Image: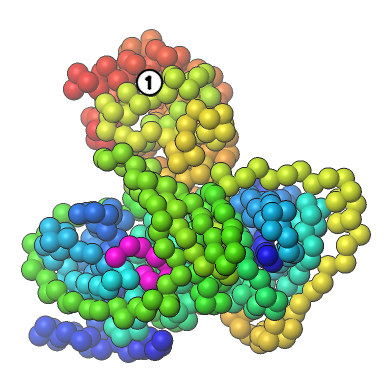
Amino acid sequence: MNVVVLAKQVPDAESSIEIKGDGERLEIQQKFATSLFDEFALEEALRIRERHGGRVKVITLGAGKATEVLRTGIAMGADETLLLDHAAFLDGDGYATALALSRAVSKAPCDVVLCGKQAVDDDRGEVGPMVAQFLGLPHVGGVVKLDIAEGKASAESLAEAGREVVEVSLPAVFTVQKGLNEPRVAPITGVMKAMKAQIPKAAPEDLGLDPAEVGRAGSKVQVKRYLAPKKRPPVQIIGGEANDAAREAVRILADVERLI
Amino acid sequence: MQPARQCGFSRTWKGSFRGWLVDTILVFVETKGDAAKKASLELLSEGRKLEQAGRFRMEAVVLGPLPAGLKDRLLSLTETLVHIDDPLLEAYTPEGYAFALAGYAGEAGPKMILAGATQMGRDFMPRVAVLLGCGIVSDVTAAAWEGDPVTFVRPVYGGKVLTEVSCNGFPVIVTTRPNAFGISEEGSRTGNLVERQAGVTADQVHTRIQRADAKPKGKVDLTEADIIVSGGRGLKAAENFRLIEELADAIGGTVGATRSVVDAGWRDQEDQVGKSGKTVSPKLYIAVGISGAIHHIMGMDTSKVVLAVNKDPNAIIFQYANYGIVGDLFEVVPAMTAELKKR
């Protein structure tokens, strides 16, 4: 059972982000972490290998700190990595990113593709389903429980209407979320191994792609500018004893805000 | 798959002298039993406004079963309702829905395809984008429809920053966050119903629903709720969530929770608001006993009005609230519930 994990290194949730140059660019504090949901994907891949054998490969796309997510994967126990490493790959929309990643996945046969339900920087949640469609594979989104068998899998997800269990033939793509597992802490031997590991790289031509098809050039959606979210006015504290404050709060919500 | 027809000619002139200038927009209407999802109704309202402005004509598209009552309701909200049916669309599958919608879009040649950024919309619309070879803008919170190209606002980094984006080619697929737009009740139309077969084949669909555990009836999903009452660690114990439930009942709201109380097993994962849970945009968000960790703020900062109840006057949540009560939630919350019941 060969498993591919698509993972991403993202700014830490606590990192400060400032909008610079009249909305042209962002200045992000250099503090990074594996995207929250991708950690569940890494963990699940290792558990599948423990049960069914096979290999776990982690793929990412990006420059600079992007490699860290691959080293995290090796430290946790992944067998192989691949870095899509070329300036042309960068700043892509969901479509361009998914196209590159799908080509990288298809370089070797695999049974299961796992990724987080969305990366917690761009919050697009597009890449998993798009990779599946580019590869002509089914996908199950927002998975919280996954049982792999020969040639098929049973995946439980949290649908809006309630929990849902879906049976799907393999190979398939699964986007995963919190609740699936508890990601392991990498053992120190794994961390040592990861530090020394050579990271294989691929450029667009290695994937049979023209640089114009990927990254910013291949994107169909462009970011025009960055804006600050609307600031709330300063909080209005409702004073008095509990009963008075409660009555006043209900009055404001009903008569001033007209919400109830 | 045929590429989308890149032309602006409208198929129904309806005598309009501007007919040749009018672009089509498709609104995917997500159904849930006998009702349309809120985000879909919001988009139908936006679409009607755009029709009135004369730049677009709208077609509402329903996939799979269409109950009679819902059909009549939708026909009062749109000039054209396209119902695409097929045995393989009986239950939702991302592949089946994507093939059916992309197939129709390839024929209708729309400028935009709109859907709610619900779980379903965000699940299958990216596949439609790949099938049509077009761009997708997900989880939009605002749109400048009059622009050319149309620009959209979508939050990134958990809402710390907003991006203004556009797509030069077309069609463009857009999913909009529930509660991003208003619903104008104007159901006076008598639309045309167009019945279609999707032509989805069994070998195109590889998933099958084995089991679906429905939530208790009448429970509004957090992402669609107008009012949410959320509880945090300040409640001290799982059983004290009863106070939150009573307040939610009295005010007509849905119960939410923070990560720490979900991790403690007091509430189910489905109730979690925040970075690793749900992102919500209700009209009113009442945060009770919640300190305001950044992970939580990321899930609720687009709420229109926020009321925070916390005994700590320095709690970060007050920086993200319109109204605050500094006090003991065990006194304030029951008093609010009692006051609401009097009204």
| Residue B1 in view | yes
In the rendering, at what x and y percent does residue A235 appear?
Answer: 45, 30
Q: Which residue is mark 1?
A: B243
Is residue A50 or residue A225 the one in the foreground? A50
Q: How is the model colour-coded?
A: rainbow
Q: Residue at x 62, y 45 (%)?
A: A181
Front position in the image: A186 or B199: B199
Please say if B217 is above or below A61. Answer: above
* Horizontal and vertical percent position of residue B18: 18, 84
For the record, the magenta segment spans B90-97
Of residue A160 and residue A99, the one placed in the foreground of this image is A160
Q: What residue lies at 42% left-to-right and 23% top-to-bottom? A: B241
Q: Secondary structure at mark 1?
A: helix
Residue B81 point in image, percent of width and height: 19, 71
Query: What residue is at 12 percent from the left and 74 percent from the top?
Result: B192
Location of residue A204 by image quarter: bottom right
Q: How many marks?
A: 1
The relative height of residue B240 versus residue A46 in the rendered view (above or below) is above
Query: In the rendered image, is residue A130 in sight?
Result: no
User: Residue at position x 28%, y 71% from top?
Assistant: B87
Q: Residue furthest top?
A: A241
Looking at the image, the residue that sits furthest to the front is: A150
Q: Quadrant of residue B60?
A: bottom left
Q: Tag 1, which chain?
A: B
Q: Amino acid at mark 1?
A: Leu
Between B3 and A63, the residue placed more toward the observer is B3
Find residue A14 and report its image quarter: top right
